[in-house]
């Protein structure tokens, strides 16, 4: 492979390779999977009631959930129970309620410049504003 250059279309972390030195590969051969980790996406459900409460915004003239969801801060709890120091933001809400669970899938995004976060080792929460 001294005459070959392998590049990824995305910045991220490469997984375990799927081929070994000496294997015959072609243009469509998958060598490994690359996961984007900065920023990292976190998927979590919220109840339909919580979604409606946030979408309502508490009164007339308020903004809807989808339009201004990126302003709702997210908090990330790491696998060891500590809180990730950088807040995240909502970037997507699914279009339908899961009939089995009564929840709506939310996608959050967190900065991850040190590549500390990995998929499936975190839990995201919507940070509730302090009561006044």
Image: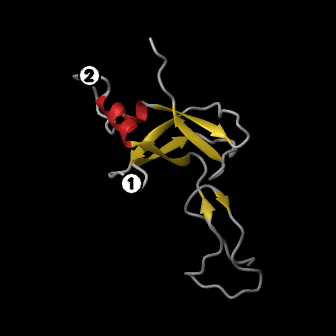
Spatial CA distance of label 2 from label 1 is 26 Å
Disc 2: CA contacts within 10 A as few (<14), some (14-19) or many (>=20): few
**Figure quadrant of residue 18:** bottom right
What is the secondary structure assignment of the residue under circle 2?
loop
Residue drawn 35% across the image and 51% down it:
97
- The dot on residue 98 is 1
**Figure quadrant of residue 33:** bottom right
List the residue tagged with mark 2.
59
List x then y, in percent, for residue 120.
63, 52
Residue 103 as seen in the image, left or right of residue 78: left
Residue drawn 65% across the image and 75% down it:
31
What is the secondary structure assignment of the residue under circle 1?
loop
List x then y, in percent, for residue 8.
60, 64
Task: Give whichever of discs 2 and 1 has the lower sequence position.
Answer: 2
The front one of 64 and 49 is 49
Residue 98 as seen in the image, left or right of residue 74: left
Residue drawn 65% across the image and 34% down it:
84
């Amino acid at each position: 492979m001294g005459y070959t250059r392998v590049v990824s279309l995305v910045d991220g972390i490469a997984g375990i390779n799927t081929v070994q030195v000496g294997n015959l590969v072609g243009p469509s051969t998958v060598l490994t999977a690359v996961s984007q980790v900065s920023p990292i996406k976190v998927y979590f459900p919220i109840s339909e009631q919580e979604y409606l409460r946030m979408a309502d915004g508490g009164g007339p003239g308020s903004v809807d959930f989808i339009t201004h969801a990126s302003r709702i801060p997210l908090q990330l709890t790491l696998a060891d129970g500590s809180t990730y120091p950088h807040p995240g933001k909502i970037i997507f809400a699914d279009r339908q309620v899961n009939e089995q669970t009564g929840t709506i899938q939310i996608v959050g995004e967190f900065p991850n410049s040190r590549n500390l976060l990995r998929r499936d080792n975190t839990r995201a929460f919507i940070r509730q504003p302090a009561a006044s």
